[in-house]
Image: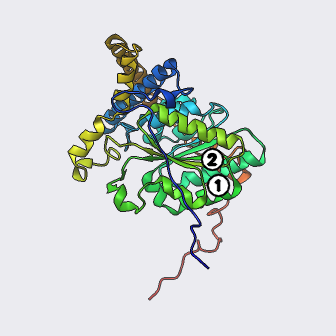
């Protein structure tokens, strides 16, 4: 039998707004309005100020380790705008703060989380999102399960899960991708390829030329986009959500971006990254290019910039005060948000603050004094 080609594929790269603030008007048609551009720029700016205050809280010993979102904000705001608040689910990693805020999460919850206060993980009723995920890759399985449940219930919902390039080297990623395509679950896999898996560059921790091509193995629609372009992040997410709502199943988005800060405040990226690389990406900063675009259209001015910076400082200072001045938690809080209905044995533990099923009987096997060996 002669040889034949059984599979061929190509992957598109989408950029609509370049680093100089120049817009491809044809690709931008029917995407983001001028008013929405201003709104997204404001959200990115507030998130950037949030990062600065969080950094200071950590350095002054008032908060634990914190991962800055700096440089990657366009992904969160573009995707956040494309998804429907109160209908679609967000299943984040830990660099999507702006999207969570846009979908209703009180900003101080993120600070509480990094302060080690579990109340930061108690998502308010009506906010369709899971707590931020620290383990690498596990949230993709959760997102796929939520999406499958929505499909079984015939709910008009889309689930978007966010993760980094390093997470695509985890087994959880492949399990989620396979299940999602087999079941045609309405889930969007949104990879923020920020070039570094902590201190390991992308080209070392994987052999793929792109991250997007990993979706081809599962016959999943896939695209690579400029992750610092609010138009591209919005359009790619909107298109994937539309496909999912129409029964087209899951999609994969590789958003090429860059982590301008350290991996977390416990990291020092100067030990493994060249400053020249960082400087090159600074010129691609999503805030800078968006401001250039707005100024070119007469949508922005130095006065508006000054006013926004002052407003962002006031907002974030109030958020920090709320987190720092919250009343102390009580031991009973441990039980209150674990189950919708607390089981009887845990209810007894909550009332007595001691275990009710183990350790109360001196005759219980394993608790008797054991004879000493000679």
Q: Callout 2: few (<14), some (14-19), or many (20+) C-alpha neighbours within 10 Å?
A: many
Mark 2 vs 1: CB contact within 8 A: yes
In what element is the residue under mark 1?
helix
In what element is the residue under mark 2?
strand
Q: Which label is found at residue 187?
A: 2
Q: Which label is found at residue 180?
A: 1
Q: Residue at x 40, y 36 (%)?
A: 228
Q: Nearer the viewer, residue 230 or 8?
A: 8
Q: Position of residue 185 (x, y in %)?
A: 68, 50
The answer to whether 209 is drawn above or below residue 42 in the figure is below
Q: Earlier in the sequence, mark 2 or mark 1?
A: 1
Q: Nearer the viewer, residue 163 or 352?
A: 163
Q: Position of residue 84 (x, y in %)?
A: 63, 32
Q: Residue at x 66, y 42 (%)?
A: 243
Residue 140 lies left or right of residue 185; in this view the side is: left
Q: Nearer the viewer, residue 6 or 230?
A: 6
Res 248 visible? yes
- Dividing the picture into quarters, in which one does residue 317 lie? top left
């Amino acid at each position: 039998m002669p040889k034949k080609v059984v599979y061929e594929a190509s992957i598109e790269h989408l950029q609509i707004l370049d680093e100089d603030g120049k817009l491809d008007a044809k690709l931008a048609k029917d995407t983001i309005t001028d008013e929405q551009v201003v709104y997204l720029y404001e959200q990115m700016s507030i998130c950037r100020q949030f990062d600065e205050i969080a950094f200071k809280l950590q350095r002054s010993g008032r908060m634990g380790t914190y991962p800055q979102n700096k440089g990657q904000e366009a992904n969160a705001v573009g995707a956040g705008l494309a998804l429907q608040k109160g209908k679609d689910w967000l299943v984040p990693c830990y660099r999507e703060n702006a999207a969570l805020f846009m979908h209703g999460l009180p900003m101080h919850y993120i600070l509480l989380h990094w302060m080690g206060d579990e109340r930061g993980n108690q998502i308010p009723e009506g906010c369709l999102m899971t707590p931020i995920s620290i383990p690498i890759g596990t949230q993709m399985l959760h997102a796929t399960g939520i999406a499958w449940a929505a499909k079984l219930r015939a709910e008009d919902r889309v689930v978007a899960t966010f993760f980094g390039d390093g997470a695509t080297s985890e087994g959880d990623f492949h399990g989620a991708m396979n299940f999602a395509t087999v079941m045609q679950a309405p889930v969007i896999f949104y990879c923020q390829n920020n070039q570094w898996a902590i201190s390991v560059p992308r080209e070392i921790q994987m052999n793929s030329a792109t991250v997007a091509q990993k979706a081809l193995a599962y016959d999943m629609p896939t695209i690579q986009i400029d992750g610092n372009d609010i138009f591209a992040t919005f359009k790619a997410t909107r298109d994937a959500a539309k496909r999912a709502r129409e029964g087209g199943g899951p999609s994969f988005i590789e958003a090429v971006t860059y982590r301008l800060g350290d991996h977390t405040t416990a990291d020092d990226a100067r030990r493994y990254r060249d400053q020249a690389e960082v400087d090159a990406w600074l010129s691609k900063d999503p805030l800078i290019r968006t401001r250039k675009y707005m100024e070119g259209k007469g949508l922005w001015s130095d006065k508006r910039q000054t006013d926004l910076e002052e407003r962002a400082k006031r907002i974030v200072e109030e958020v920090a005060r709320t987190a720092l001045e919250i009343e102390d938690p009580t031991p009973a809080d441990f039980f209150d948000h674990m189950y919708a209905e607390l089981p009887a044995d845990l209810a007894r533990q909550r009332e007595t603050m001691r275990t009710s099923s183990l350790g109360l009987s001196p005759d219980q096997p394993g608790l008797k004094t054991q004879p000493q060996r000679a």
